[in-house]
């Protein structure tokens, strides 16, 4: 199949779904996916680990994030060269955080550097839209290697990248396509300390819009896989006569490490029923 090789994600992303890949592959089984769509791209772990035969349509409301992937696709070597000049110190972190370069390549490298050196890999902006996550005080960081950026650049050559609201993804959905949906979680479940911030990003009204989008995906005779919070309100909203799987992940965001533990999540899908 086209685009079958796995590539490692290069961003630390709150709510990232690398851990979910084995479950997704099990759900897909022998299903041949035509085009692949992911409108909440984030760290892109599922895109980088999923096979498809056609084109990828990738989007996110975060324009800075989309610019990072565009720069890696178009000039990964320059991104790597700039990354090489960054160092893991609080002084350099706060200086870099305070200065937004004019050149897209420099902004992309800055984004990746801040992501790897920030607290918990969280992306957060203030009311003015300024990135304001504090330094993470990590003893060592693992900035992406040149070969990793090259691999991701190769996968992105057949991808269309856009910064936009998730609802627009339906414009390109065709029969036999797969739409993977991983929105910010907006209900309290298993003491997730990141919920309050996510409510500003993705409201309950947005969850309802997402439910309507899934109805459109099904009418287009396409597949969807939705990851969401394990909560009664979510189960009711996304009950469409399809499959619901309960999964467990390590809760790696918010609070002291001793209180993180594991959290349950739901995975909804019509694979096998489209």
Image (cartoon, grey):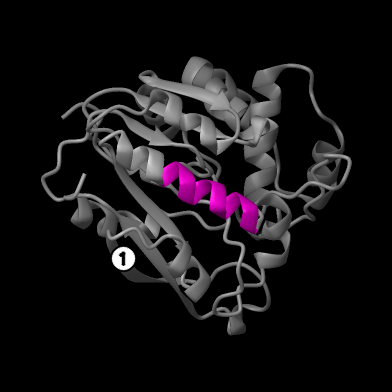
- Residue 256 lies, in percent from the top left, at 67, 79
Q: Is residue 61 left or right of residue 200?
A: left
> What residue is rendered at 66% in x and 70% in y?
254
- Residue 113 lies, in percent from the top left, at 66, 40
Q: Is residue 93 left or right of residue 247?
A: right
- Residue 110 lies, in percent from the top left, at 70, 33
Please tell me in which quadrant of the rendered image residue 264 appears. bottom left
> What residue is rendered at 61% in x and 56% in y?
140
> What residue is rendered at 60% in x and 68% in y?
187
- The segment highlighted magenta reads 204-214
- Check disc 1 and report its element: helix, strand or loop: strand
Instruction: State the residue in front, 82 or 221.
Output: 221
**Residue density around tag 1, few if under 14, some if 14–19, many if 20 or more, within 10 Å:** some
Residue extending furthest toward the bottom: 258
Q: Is residue 63 left or right of residue 168?
A: right
Say if residue 57 shows up in the picture.
yes
């Amino acid at each position: 199949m086209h685009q079958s090789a796995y590539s490692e994600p290069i961003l630390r992303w709150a709510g990232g779904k690398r851990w979910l890949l084995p479950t997704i592959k099990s759900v897909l089984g022998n299903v041949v996916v035509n085009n692949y769509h992911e409108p909440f791209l984030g760290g892109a772990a599922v895109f980088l680990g999923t096979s498809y035969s056609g084109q990828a349509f990738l989007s996110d409301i975060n324009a800075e994030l989309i610019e990072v992937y565009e720069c890696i696709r178009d000039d990964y070597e320059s991104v790597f060269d700039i990354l090489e000049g960054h160092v893991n110190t609080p002084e350099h972190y706060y200086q870099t955080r305070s200065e937004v370069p004019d050149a897209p390549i420099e902004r992309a490298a800055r984004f990746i550097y801040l992501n790897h050196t920030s607290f918990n890999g969280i992306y957060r902006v203030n009311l003015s839209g300024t990135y304001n996550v504090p330094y993470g005080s990590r003893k060592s960081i693992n900035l992406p290697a040149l070969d990793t950026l090259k691999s991701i650049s190769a996968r992105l050559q057949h991808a269309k990248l856009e910064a936009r609201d998730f609802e627009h993804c339906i414009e390109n959905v065709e029969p036999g396509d797969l739409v993977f949906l991983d929105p910010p979680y907006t209900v309290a479940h298993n003491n997730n300390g990141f919920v309050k911030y996510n409510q500003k990003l993705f409201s309950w009204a947005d969850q309802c819009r997402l439910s309507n989008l899934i109805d459109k995906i099904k009418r287009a005779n396409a597949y969807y896989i939705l990851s969401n919070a394990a909560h009664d309100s979510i189960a009711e909203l996304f009950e469409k006569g399809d499959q619901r799987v309960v999964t467990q992940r390590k809760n790696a965001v918010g609070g002291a490490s001793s209180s993180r533990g594991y959290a349950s999540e739901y995975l909804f899908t019509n694979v096998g029923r489209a």
